[in-house]
Amino acid sequence: MDLFERLKDLREKGLSEIDKAQTEEKLNDVRVKLIGRKSELTEILHSMKDVEPEQRREIGQSVNKVRDLFNQKLDDAKNELVEKLIAEQMAKEKIDVTLPGRSNHLGSKHPIYIILDDLEEFFIGMGYKVVQGPEIETDHYCFEMMNLPKDHPARDMQETFYIDPEDLLRTQTSGDQARVLEKHDFSKGPLKMVGPGKVYRRDDDDATHSHQFMQMEGLVADKNITMGDLKGTLELMAKHVFGQNRQTRLRPSYFPFTEPSVEMDVSCFNCDGKGCAICKYTGWIEVLGAGMIHPNVLENAGVDSSVYSGFAFGVGLDRFAILKYGIDDIRDFYTNDVRFLEQFSREEK
Ligand code: DAH
């Protein structure tokens, strides 16, 4: 077969191979085979030395033509392939703009924080500041400053989670009182503060008790603060939380850091004081502890108790939430079941 016929033959075969190659990989193989260094085309070029000089030019031109044709066809085939791939991909990824969008799942405020935020606003509105003490509290602030020296029997009811002999998970937010009393400059006006936060103490873990819960401490100190101020403040708060028709009453009680001490009851919002299961047929529900700041607490913080007086109160926020929302197990607050929590979400429409 002379070189022209070989070339013609090669051209036909080559074009049909390019036609058949359906992937980029195969196209590359065909490219190497047809125009690579070891291709038949190169071989034909090499064998030109045996050809009559007049024919060389002609053969050379024909080889170039075939190579150009192959190059052209290989490029076309490759472009076609890429376009086909893009078209397939586009068809696969077609977006149906009429489908409804995916909505974000918004969490909801925890019921205890609903109460807490509401109470903070309430007290801020009456000129109180909000303070936040440390959850790991020192024995000094949690007990000693609050008139509970090391041998005080009332410590037994609370002290539990010690980190070392001097530091523990706070059993009450009352230590916040001492922290602010120590720093307050009475020449600038009265001290009015609330201090919310988590507290930890040994307790029965049952439907109404938990070893972790939320308290909010309150304190007002100045000259001439009386029990009347305490009663008026607590009554306003109780009505704000439980409804304007509620009655309140103070009963004598005992706390080491107040003297005299009281507990406050609210008339049962379920039966309006007639007696039901919620108020254990007494018509009243106990909601908080309070009292006039014990002179020792003032003196411990460097405040002259012959000049200044004040009142303090401690609210169990879990208890408030349980009563307000009719929740029957305190553990629901801490087990993070979204079915429970979602009941408190605001509906987004
Ligand atoms: N710290 C008390 C407790 O955990 C609650 C309390 C009662 C706080 C009376 C007060 C108060 O500030 O005056 O049981």
Image (cartoon, helix red, strand yellow):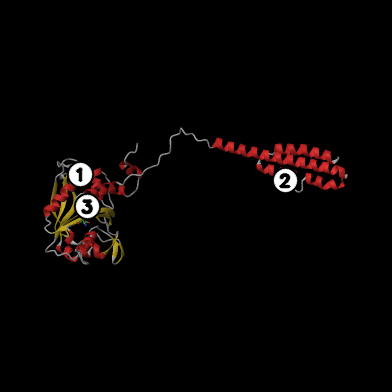
Distance, label 2 to label 1, CA atoms, is 87 Å
In the image: residue 183, left or right of residue 229? right
Give coordinates of residue 128: x percent, y percent.
21, 53
Towards the viewer: 30 or 49: 49
State if disc 2 and disc 3 touch (CB < 8 Å). no
Q: Which residue is mark 2?
A: 32
At mark 2, the secondary structure is helix
Q: Nearer the viewer, mark 2 or mark 1?
A: 2
- Camera sees residue 319: no
At mark 1, the secondary structure is helix
Q: Which residue is mark 3?
A: 315
Distance, label 3 to label 1, CA atoms, is 14 Å
- Camera sees residue 27: yes
Residue placed at 25% from the left, 43% from the top? 325
State if disc 1 and disc 2 touch (CB < 8 Å). no
Q: Is mark 3 within 8 Å of ligand 1?
A: yes
Q: Amino acid at mark 3?
A: Val
> Total number of numbered labels?
3
In the image: residue 108, left or right of residue 145? right
First-in-chain label (2 vs 1): 2
Q: Nearer the viewer, mark 3 or mark 2?
A: 2
First-in-chain label (3 vs 1): 1
Relative to 213, is 80 above or below?
A: above
Q: Which mark is residue 75?
A: none
Towards the viewer: 282 or 138: 138
Relative to 157, is 86 above or below?
A: above
Mark 3 residue crowding within 10 angstroms, few (<14) / some (14–19) / many (20+): some
Quarter of the image where one finds residue 19 = top right
Give coordinates of residue 70: x percent, y percent.
73, 40
Mark 2 residue crowding within 10 angstroms, few (<14) / some (14–19) / many (20+): few
Mark 1 residue crowding within 10 angstroms, few (<14) / some (14–19) / many (20+): some
Towards the viewer: 337 or 302: 302
